[in-house]
Amino acid sequence: YSSPHGDAERGRTLFENLLSTFPKKLDLWTVYVDAEVKKEEEEDNRERVRGLFERVSRGKWKAKQMKFWFKKWLQWEEGIGDEGGKERVETLAAEWVKRKAEEQGKKME
């Protein structure tokens, strides 16, 4: 991504291949999103960044991991000044918490 001779698509392909092999490695997702955010400053690819955030939010993660992820996403939305995006993250986070609470309730029955 940041190489003077690097091609962004090549970097994306590399990350996608790594994530297809290691989909539960949140650190890989974080590096990928950070690279896209950095690239977003050069070209308008906000929807690509949002897509990555959403892909992770649909996965099965521990509460601590999702807290980190939603916080990261929310900070990014606030940083670009998108109120609609911020509200969407807050809604998705609340839905995730509700879904997890329901799952925990079913396990206890």
Image: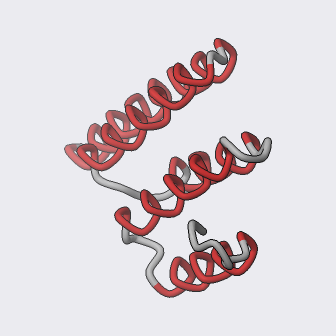
Query: For this view, does 55 lie left or right of residue 66?
Result: right
Q: Quadrant of the N terminus?
A: bottom right
Residue 30 falls in image quadrant: bottom left
Outermost residue toward the right?
Answer: 44
Residue 77 falls in image quadrant: top right
Colouring scheme, one of rainbow, by chain, secondary structure, one colour: secondary structure
Q: Quadrant of the C terminus?
A: top left
Residue 96: image location, x then y, percent: 45, 35
Residue 48: image location, x then y, percent: 73, 50
- Vertical position of residue 46 compared to residue 61: above or below: above
Residue 61: image location, x then y, percent: 36, 56
Q: Residue at coordinates 44% horizontally, 81% vertically from top-left?
A: 22
- Nearest the viewer among 77 and 100 is 77
Residue 63 falls in image quadrant: top left
Outermost residue toward the left?
Answer: 108
Query: For this view, does 6 lie left or right of residue 104?
Result: right
Outermost residue toward the top?
Answer: 83
- Number of numbered discs overlaid on the protein picture: 0
Query: For this view, does 41 lie left or right of residue 30?
Result: right
Residue 33: image location, x then y, percent: 53, 54
Q: Residue at coordinates 54% horizontally, 58% vertically from top-left?
A: 35
- Nearest the viewer among 91 and 85 is 85
Q: Residue at coordinates 64% horizontally, 12% vertically from top-left?
A: 83
- Nearest the viewer among 46 and 69 is 46
- Vertical position of residue 41 compared to residue 84: above or below: below
Q: Residue at coordinates 66% horizontally, 72% vertically from top-left?
A: 12
- Vertical position of residue 61 compared to residue 77: above or below: below
Outermost residue toward the front?
Answer: 4
- Nearest the viewer among 46 and 104 is 46
- Vertical position of residue 42 compared to residue 72: above or below: below
